Amino acid sequence: MSHPIAGRITFNLVAGILVTVVTVIAGVAWMAYRQNDQAAAQTRTMVMGGIDAMHTRVQGLANDYSWWEEAYDAYQRGDAAWIDANIGTGIVDTQIADFLVIVSPDHQVKYGWWTPPEAPNTASVMSPALIGKIEDLIRTAPVENNAARSSYVETPAGILLFAVSRIAPVSNAGAVDPATLPLLAMGFYLNNQRLSELGRSFLINDLRLERADAVTDATREFPEIRDIFGKVIGRLVWTPPTPGFAVLRNVVAPIAGGLLIFCLIAMWTVLRARRLALSQALSEKHAIEAARTDSLTGLTNRFGFNELSASASFEEACARGEAAIIYLDINGFKSVNDSIGHQGGDALVGMLAERLSMILPPDARFARVGGDEFAVALTGRPALDAVAGGRLRHGACAGPALHGHRLPVPGDGRRRICGVRRHRRVAG
């Protein structure tokens, strides 16, 4: 058994359950992805902070080696042995850096050291174009503070992070012309070992450098590295952490259990609400039927018959002359009630209704409209022939008042019913 109201209630409740479940799942997934995004942003910040620390370190080394009175004096007197013993050993022996070069004011490589031995030498790296860019890089730096500048350059051995500063006399820095001071550039290669150590300090296990020609769509959003000429030569790449998914794996079982319990309770509520709605609809249907049904005979009562005669379909049939109404009552019914009592009278009315129902056409509407009064509504062209006494003339009309009895008609009382047959008295 189904009913539109029960269906709508069931649909709304089920839709509410689905919306709730989807909202919970979407909310949990959104929180996990949001946590992953925040972790990725924090990791990016830490990596860039680590790279900035590497720049600061190489700039500090360049400042230490260049802001040195003895180094300036040794360069001015051309003391190559002193420079090699005090500056070059920092590369060759202690390997504090991978690359160190001193460029003269006339743009020539004066001294150079590099490690490992198979790495490109200073002469091959320091092209005239690179020397010009290094001079432009340090040009605006003040001599007094000896603030080093850093950048990148791509070499056959890899990407070199270097810093450049002026070799200046500490005691007389403000009196010398910056253009007459030699430049010291030193740095180290961004190899996988150094980047791996940097990454592990931030709990990143696979921090690496990808060359520009190896960058894919998946790594295009990672931080880029530009050389001193402004060209993108690589990107710092790593696997972003996913703490949100780790948390989600821990809470998925409790959430699934909670949703299951919620769904079970909700479905029980849906079924109970559906049963209540069906029961209410059935009660309403019975009430509507009872309001239009005669309790003694089970026939349509006066109210239901008036609804039928006022319906649009009956009005259309009447307008076409294809409708008829027959009224009947029982002769001497009062004497029946007086002789055998009202219970006997009711039994007579019931038996009469049953027998008349058996002889009427299947499509006839039979109604009890009073204590001993009945009415039959016939529609369709055969209806006129079915009326006793022959066919009525199309359009012949008569009012519903017969022998002093009037059937109440809904509306303003001016409606005309076509094909009304005067009722017969049925002997009691």
Image (tube, rainbow, N blue to C red):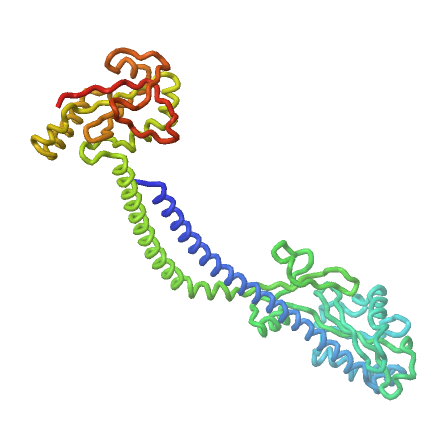
Answer whether residue 111 is visible to the viewer in this image.
no
Task: Give the residue drawn at x 91%, y 82%.
Answer: 176
Residue 110 relative to residue 90: left or right: right
The x, y position of residue 132, in whole percent, is 86, 67
Can you tell which quarter of the image residue 221 is in?
Answer: bottom right
Residue extending farthest to the left is: 340
260, 41: nearer the viewer: 260
Can you tell which quarter of the image residue 88 is in?
Answer: bottom right
Quarter of the image that includes the N terminus: top left
Can you tell which quarter of the image residue 419 is in?
Answer: top left
Quarter of the image that includes the C terminus: top left
The x, y position of residue 308, in whole percent, is 32, 28
Task: Give the residue drawn at x 39%, y 46%.
Answer: 11
The x, y position of residue 238, in whole percent, is 59, 64
Residue 59 relative to residue 209: left or right: right
309, 329: nearer the viewer: 329
366, 185: nearer the viewer: 366
Residue 348 relative to residue 411: left or right: left
Q: How many tags in the picture? A: 0
The x, y position of residue 334, in whole percent, is 14, 29
In the displayed structure, 210 sits above or below 89; it is above
In the displayed structure, 279 sits above or below 248; it is above
Answer whether residue 35 is visible to the viewer in this image.
yes
Task: Give the residue drawn at x 85%, y 80%.
Answer: 143
116, 66: nearer the viewer: 66
Residue extending farthest to the front is: 404
